Amino acid sequence: MEVREGDYVLLRLDDKRKYLVRAEKGRMLHTHKGIVDLGSLVGAKYGDYVESHLNAKFRVLKPTIVDFVRFFSRGTQVIYPKDAALMIVLAGIGPGSRVVEAGTGSGALAALLAYYVRPDGVVYSYDVKESVLEIARRNLRKAGVADWVVLKRGDVTEEIEERGVDAVFLDLSTPWLVVKNASDALKSGGSFVSFSPTINQVEKTVEELRAHDFVDVVAIEAIVRRYRVKAGKTRPEMFMVGHTGYIVLARKP
Amino acid sequence: MEVREGDYVLLRLDDKRKYLVRAEKGRMLHTHKGIVDLGSLVGAKYGDYVESHLNAKFRVLKPTIVDFVRFFSRGTQVIYPKDAALMIVLAGIGPGSRVVEAGTGSGALAALLAYYVRPDGVVYSYDVKESVLEIARRNLRKAGVADWVVLKRGDVTEEIEERGVDAVFLDLSTPWLVVKNASDALKSGGSFVSFSPTINQVEKTVEELRAHDFVDVVAIEAIVRRYRVKAGKTRPEMFMVGHTGYIVLARKP
Amino acid sequence: MEVREGDYVLLRLDDKRKYLVRAEKGRMLHTHKGIVDLGSLVGAKYGDYVESHLNAKFRVLKPTIVDFVRFFSRGTQVIYPKDAALMIVLAGIGPGSRVVEAGTGSGALAALLAYYVRPDGVVYSYDVKESVLEIARRNLRKAGVADWVVLKRGDVTEEIEERGVDAVFLDLSTPWLVVKNASDALKSGGSFVSFSPTINQVEKTVEELRAHDFVDVVAIEAIVRRYRVKAGKTRPEMFMVGHTGYIVLARKP
Amino acid sequence: MEVREGDYVLLRLDDKRKYLVRAEKGRMLHTHKGIVDLGSLVGAKYGDYVESHLNAKFRVLKPTIVDFVRFFSRGTQVIYPKDAALMIVLAGIGPGSRVVEAGTGSGALAALLAYYVRPDGVVYSYDVKESVLEIARRNLRKAGVADWVVLKRGDVTEEIEERGVDAVFLDLSTPWLVVKNASDALKSGGSFVSFSPTINQVEKTVEELRAHDFVDVVAIEAIVRRYRVKAGKTRPEMFMVGHTGYIVLARKP
């Protein structure tokens, strides 16, 4: 497969240093290993190398949806793929699903959801701030999933307009205030899914879900351990991300 | 939404006791809380209750793909949804993906993959035993995803026939013996994904992947902690599944 | 070393089946592998085997303090050695330390503390129930550490009589109600240590410690993973104790 | 209690910044918050504050054995207190125990063992390098436990001179090569305890222990999670030490 003008490409120097760039004539990528002419990417094959002016070799890779998401608003907090993976699969979200999501933020969770509801599903993503939606719009376009996301300015603690949706995904500070509206929006059997950093948020959300007769209310935490593997010297990594957040799942009866 | 004759339904007594049954006239489900007439399910609405002859109430729920997989060959070892979720999402598998998978086993991983590659992707699932494929065939049909899985009798340590696939998923005892064939089958940028219970399998597989120039070789373990949440009395569950297996991910350059 | 009449001995059939017994003429141990004459233990050497009447072999071992504690009130909840170990060492408790402890319960934590403050330290162990103290008294005698424990009937949320102690250890349901009294009892630099199953207890205790100007306030959880080790087949145990409780440590300035 | 000339003192600025210093006339501590006259510590009470010339307040605390150990050879790898705590308590080491330990390294594990075998036990600590023993000697003196440690130059894979000891503690790269000598040195019922960063070391050591008829062979890993506790905002720390090493415990029959 060949890179075409305008395609996004992952340039990989090594396991730690990767660059998400656009193949475009006249554009340059400046790295500490030299300058790469991004125009030279056009016509390259995935798997090939391109060289910087200092002769450092960069592998040309096709970014996955997870690669795209990792580059959304670098620096700000973006949901971890490990958490999004569990949320999406345990809620049974897949091709054709209709999902409400809030808050949009950088669009990371919306992008992953959009990727999985393709080609005939849809994600309604709410955020209270127009400026945030603007950034998300750009990110979703870059990742090639903008067609499956309806960005909406609005506060889901006040109203969710959709009805009969398969799931409501929440990554905001007060998920318990959305339980009533989520219940109205969900079809029978639909999934409530929220992600929260603190245990107190979990406690409030679970209590509220029970008060609204949700079933199969589950609170979990996904911890991913990475290993440093070498023949005869294998061990878990010394430093790890010990906590990102808790996931609450429930089902509307 | 209404239950139609022949549909699979999840009957829920409580969080622990659920039954995956088929709505069918003349069939009965025997439980310790009495007998449920499965014919009475036809025409019921999801979210409704049906009653056993002892007046126990069972909620009628639409099973998700994860519910189906949990009921594949009860008793035998089936890949955990938490592991499948990470494997699928981190490998970027989604609608349209072409995936090779082995061994088929009960069909659990194949079913989840099939669910996610719909409607225009395909899963080629290999197993060495015809009898195993027969059980998987039945499970996949039950879960409604048989159309996206090509079951193949064959040994992937000897040959993988497909070329240019997006990913090779392995849940078998000697993944390192499949690295060469996986490399041949994968497109550039495609993902190698294996699941193994022991660290020794991980060590051998990672070494072999490096020897075949795979990049972004990662070995991880997903640990899911469940919480017992009650206002003022919240704590992790005392007993937990401490280990299912390790996931190895790599990318063909 | 030889077993003398009256000594407590650990009879070990295998890794899972061990019996804490007393070497005593005329006493018998009934097991599903036959009857062992406990009189025959007198004069045996540690490391020897004794046989049941069905010729099952039991190894004669000298119990450690941890072995004793594991046999205190079997069935009821006893603090785990992993938690006690961290509490004792991180608080710097050792030979000569003077420690207040509550509630006594089966005496498990008191026994371990007593073992470590020997030969010239002392443990003041409070419980509100006389009947509980009676059981603890017997357990402490059995473990050979009764001389270093002063069992006291009293409620530490109301009063701690001692002054200038090195540490206050709490294994009771409302540690935050003891913070004021612990502060009065502790010497400058002394350690407050509490063990609680729920995160809500931790939250209340930590807040109260800060309100009373304690420093180095730390809340931790110790998770111990066991491994099933076999050459080429090594993996963590599938089922594990996922949670016992949280430890709060703080220092009086 | 008052600080005397020559005493070691822990000066605490806040939870993260602590200094282990000696109260000595004419000596100064230079910090980014100003200079502290260490002579002024003499006669101060524990719990008091001293001020730097920039009026920063430092709390005067009495260091525990764990505080001392944390300051041994800062920068180099020292056994974590959490691991040492489990090793010591699970092996039943306490006042009066006789323990062999290798390699000495900075003396951290020897210091903790010495603290716990006081006043009538002893630690024989082996290292192959004289220069290492020299540093350890200084550290042990500083921590006030030198009287209970016999530092020995020697290679425990070749010989352990002691007999009938209560435990052999190993923190070196090839513990499996010491199993035979440890077995000779241990009394019946004595504990073999080793600490190793990699799982491969664990595998070799466990196999060797079984080959030498050790019983109760256990391989564990202690993971300590720290919590950030605030009323209504409690969560585990985001970054954590994910792995230090594995502990192998066994008993000589």
Image (cartoon, coloured by chain):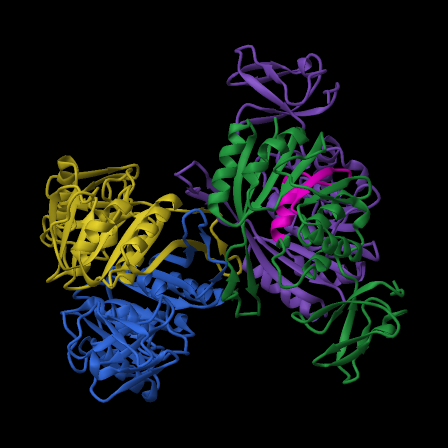
Chain colours: A blue, B yellow, C purple, D green
Instruction: Determine whether, in the image, residue D252 is placed left or right of residue B115.
Output: right
Instruction: Determine whether, in the image, residue D211 is placed left or right of residue B35.
Output: right
Q: Which is nearer the eye, B135 or A102?
A: B135
**Quadrant for the N terminus of chain B in the image:** bottom left
Q: Position of residue B145 (x, y in %)?
A: 14, 53
Q: Which is nearer the eye, A121 or B119?
A: B119
Q: Is A14 one of the magenta-colored residues?
A: no
Q: Is residue C203 above or below residue D167?
A: below
The residue depicted at 17 percent of the width and 41 percent of the height is B155
The residue depicted at 41 percent of the width and 78 percent of the height is A76
Q: Would residue A193 be visible to someone looking at this image? A: yes
Q: Looking at this rendering, what residue extends furthest in the top direction?
A: C53
Q: Is D89 one of the magenta-colored residues?
A: yes
Residue B24 position by quadrant: top left
Q: Is residue D200 above or below residue B182?
A: above
Residue B53 position by quadrant: top left
Q: Is residue C162 above or below residue A32?
A: above
**Quadrant for the C terminus of chain B in the image:** bottom left
The residue depicted at 35 percent of the width and 58 percent of the height is B218
Q: Which is nearer the eye, D194 or C241?
A: D194
- Residues in magenta, as a range: D82-103
Residue C185 position by quadrant: bottom right
Instruction: Determine whether, in the image, residue B158 is placed left or right of residue D81.
Output: left
Q: Position of residue D91 (x, y in %)?
A: 64, 39
